[in-house]
Amino acid sequence: MTASSAQVRGVRPLAAVVAIFLGFSATVVAPVDAAHAHGAELREREYWLEDYGIKEAWESTRGKGVTVAVIDSGVDGSHPDLEGVVVGGTDVSGAGAPNGQEGLGEVPEHGTLVASLLAGRGHVPEEEPDASPSPSASPSASASPSAEPEEDPVGRGPDGVIGVAPEADLLAVSLWIGGESSGPNPAGISIDDQIPNAVRWAVDNGASVINMSLGSTSPTWPESWDEAFLYAEQNDVVIVAAAGNRAGGSVQVGAPATMPGVLAVGGLDADGKASRESSSEGISIGIAAPAENLVGALPGGLYAAKWSGTSGAAPLVSGVAALIRSKYPDLTAPQVINRIIMTAKDAGVPGKDTIYGHGILDAAAAVNADLDVPAEPLLGAGGVVSMAQFIETYRRGEAPPPPSPAPPAPAEPLPDIPEPTVPVAEERAASSTSLPALIVFGFGGVILLILLGGTYQVVRVYRGTASGGEPEASAGAPDAEKFAAEGVSQDGPSASR
């Protein structure tokens, strides 16, 4: 079989339909079958098992009792590393097998790759037939028994791919994701309907974790998805989604990784740095995990020797979520996510950023750290932490109530100030002496007399003038003019006659 590569790009069927692609950058399918997939060829390439604390996490849990739904292109449950792992499934596209184990769409092998990284169990290598002894061989040499293969402490054997949660169970939910070569879904069911139907089926059939290694080129999603993701939220299900890849046409994070409550996974290269091609960027990214130089199982008992994309990073995180749910069954879905992001190793700019999210996955700390995990969700882009809040705020047209103002800092109490006394008017006391009254009346009498006297004189003069005579002379006053007229001087009668 020759090496081949595949690159998935989203296409837009209709304006009302979201273009969904698988978070898958490139695959090199090595011509390795199950019989020759020895640990040195594949198991040792799983660098993330050691570098990201997964082997250390296995000391306390391997995911037993947890069911994870893989919503993807279908999972080949007959692969040697996945035998007995897939415990149920369905097809929501109308074009696949009823049990979800047939590869569909543009990249039919995609779901098997994802499933193996999440819960692969490896396998015991097949014993090669003993070679016939040569004539020159000594009997003792030919009679020596063949060495028993070393038992692997995790999984079924040292060969093949081992997943992060090798004791977890899987549900295979197949859907049709079209592309340039496969075209649209021949059954005619749109992705707008396939996605919510897949989520609801997974919840109803016992999944406590859902892995979605797929995404859209748009950060928004159809309203038809709202109720299904709300249903998962109300049933306490963890949803993990791939953030998308620049190589596949996603520069920014697309739905469903942008949906409230969904843990979006960004991609890292083999050196633990942000991947240029196998990741995207956005405020929705919650955690970063390996997304380059991955290995995985392929349908038909084959393996991918090298593939890249946040499609592979997402199941590594989903596997850690399964480990946490197995060890801490009483934790809610938001608390499971809180453990993952609270224990992440900070990278990039200090604190949360748009490339690494809260940091780089640390499986050992996420599973084993002694933490006081808060009940409220710490994951939330733009302040929206749940689908219930999103629907209430943006779908029903009701603005959220304004946040309550913070109470003011307590101040020192002010001293009590007594109420001011209002003065009351008192009655005027009677004067102790009558002197002021006498003075007033005395002056008043004098003025009255003056007025009366003046009036009398005016009247008297007026009467004399009115009778035609001269005004009457004052009594006793000599009248010089009268004496002169009568020829009588004042000194007596004149001497001559």
Image: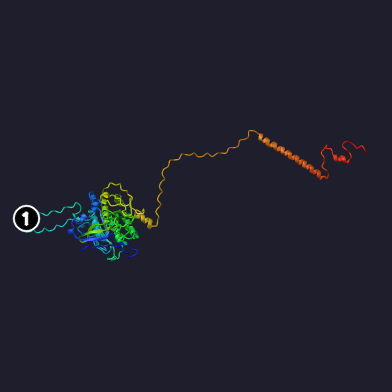
Q: Pick the residue in front: 244 or 472.
A: 244
Disc 1 crowd rating (10 Å Cα; few below 14, some 14-19, many 20+) is few
Element under disc 1: helix
Q: Which residue in the protein does label 1 denote?
A: 139
Q: Is residue 64 visible to us here?
A: no
- Judged left or right of residue 292, residue 430 is right
Q: Point out residue 263 in the picture as x, y percentages from the top left corner.
A: 31, 54
Residue 414: percent from left, percent from top: 45, 40
Residue at 38% x, 57% y is 394
Give the camera-side residue of 244 and 259.
244
- On the image, the x and y values in percent for residue 178 come to 29, 64
At x 8%, y 55%, the residue is 141
Residue occupying the far top of the picture: 432
Residue 252 sits in quarter: bottom left
Question: Residue 413: x, y in percent?
Answer: 44, 40
Residue at screen point 72% across, 39% down: 448
Q: Is residue 455 visible?
A: yes
Nearer-the-camera pick, 360 or 96? 360
Residue type at mark 1?
A: Pro
